[in-house]
Image (tube, rainbow, N blue to C red):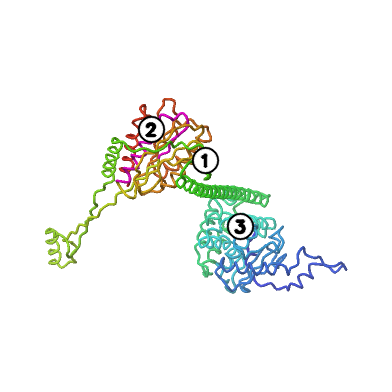
Amino acid sequence: MSAHHHVQSPATTPDDDADLARWDDDGAPPAQPRSSPDAWLRVGAELGDRLVALSGRQDLLVTCRPGTRSGAPAAFFPTLGEVEFDARLFDPLQPHEIHPRIVGDEERYPAAWGVFVHEAAHAAHSVWTKPAGADPRVVEAALLLEESRVEGAHLITRPTDRTYLRTSARTLVMPDLAHPTLQGIEHAAAVAALILGRRDVGILDAGETRAVADLCEKVLGADLLATLTRIWTAAHQCADHDATTMLAHAQQWCDALDTAAPALPVPENLTDLLSGAVGVVMDSTAATDAADLAAQAAATNAMAAQSKAQAQDRAQRASQRRKAAATAKSVFNARGTVTPDGTPAPYDNPVTGTRRPTAAEQSAASRLSRALRAAAYRERTEERTTSPTPPGRLNMRAALARDAQRAAGSVPTAEPFTHTRRRNSPTPPLRVGIAVDVSGSMRAACAPVASAAWIVARAAALTDPDSLTATIAYDRHLTALTRPTHRAPERVTTFDANGGHHNLGDAIDALDHGLELSRPGAGRLLVIVTDARYGSDETARAVTRVKQLTTAGCAVLQLTLTAGSHHLPGTTLLHLPQPSSAPAAIATAATDAIRKTR
């Protein structure tokens, strides 16, 4: 067995003579190839373009046609600067289906591309030439060692080609086993060099080559196999142009075989044993590659599915934001009750009128305003810097250290002047949204929530001109009780609870968009006053929006007034047995929200 045919001298028989010699003149028309050789000219030209990147050489020609002059699947002719490639490696693809110039097209024909990468490795690294008068047997051994050496050298610069080199081993080694040129112990040694040599350069895995390793150790003996292993390992370190060292390793190879071969018995069925062991190795590599390919495909599909899901989620969020913007515009710009799509609904308006705030409410708004200002206050930050020169406060210890450094003749590093820079920290504004359920079961909350809405809106406007609050009453429709403006409300809007359905999801969307509750940089609070007696769909929609707000850093508080109230997941539940305590609870939550803002 030999691999010498992968590096060839110029052919001495012309193509036409070879074609004539292949067929007897029996009067029959010449056999026609399945596809015209001319159709493969483009494929060969495109392979030549890719060979530049694979080998780093621009002086090579690639010929691709059915069959080769050398009889091998492919061959490299150093003196001609030519790589010969058998088009039948692309079976069952036709030339018009093959486009090697397109990076990634090689994934459709990995076996053919693996052979091409192997020949590219020869073109890049098999650049030593045999000297005149060299022993043909030694040259043959050198070319045998060259097979794994060039693949290892190629793998250093192009590690991603490992998959294709593993595939090429199956295409190149197995045909040589079927027609061995070496016999006996030399045949087993050649198999060891081709298989175990590829193991040692990282093309094949140790577990995959165990069948060949065990058989070769049994046939060659542990000592001879260790000697051969040292020889091909040393050859792997040989420089590309160093013919002398390469032939020296080949001479050691021949000497080791000549010394040990006479004492080693040769099994009668050695060729069959070697073929079976190599077949096991190739089946193992094929199974590993198939598993890796399946894992890669699964990972690619998972990434594609994740990317698609993310794109759908982004599209859904964008659609939700557009709908929320339209809902907020229709709710806060209308003077009455509207549906989420902006259609007026005058017959379901829960607003009963307005009234002047009581003295207690005005006092509560003032107290809350002072509490919010205190919670929003941030201490000034101090930044201290040192320098070798003024301005700044002189530190005598550092000044003496600097004088000592200068007197000692060293470069002064002490910095005796300290400068303190104080900066005011901006006070964060407040964003409070109140969504109040006006279904029939929430009638007890109407008066305290109306009072709380006015108190919070008034206090926020008095605290910071950038603070905003808004209140929405919701059943199946939406009604703005207070709007996100910088003006403090003059009167308290009163309302009643006579609705029969719920629409909390759209109410949260309107408050989120109108107050920018999802945007950091402010103390944000959403208060939901409800008993949460919803259907499953309405609960799911509300919980989704609550989760989005809490993830964005907005506090969400649920106020309940009755023992039979349900808890919305994701909210902080606060049960108020006395509805009149709702304003104080909301004021406390707003103060905590702005205090925690960073």
Residue 448 part of the magenta-drawn span? yes
Q: Which residues are magenta?
A: 434-462
Q: What separation in Å lies between label 1 and label 2 (alpha carbons)?
A: 23 Å
Q: Amino acid at mark 2?
A: Ala
Q: Position of residue 282 (x, y in %)?
A: 62, 51
**Reading the chain from its start, which is encountered first: label 3 or label 2?**
3
Q: Are marks 3 and 2 in contact (CB under 8 Å)?
A: no
Q: Horizontally, is 581 left or right of 344 in the view?
A: left
Residue 162 to residue 428: above or below: below
Residue under pointer 2: 447
Residue at the image position 45 percent from the left and 32 percent from the top: 497
Residue under pointer 1: 345
Q: Secondary structure at mark 2?
A: helix
Q: Nearer the viewer, residue 52 or 454?
A: 454
Residue under pointer 3: 190
Residue at the image position 58 percent from the left and 68 percent from the top: 123
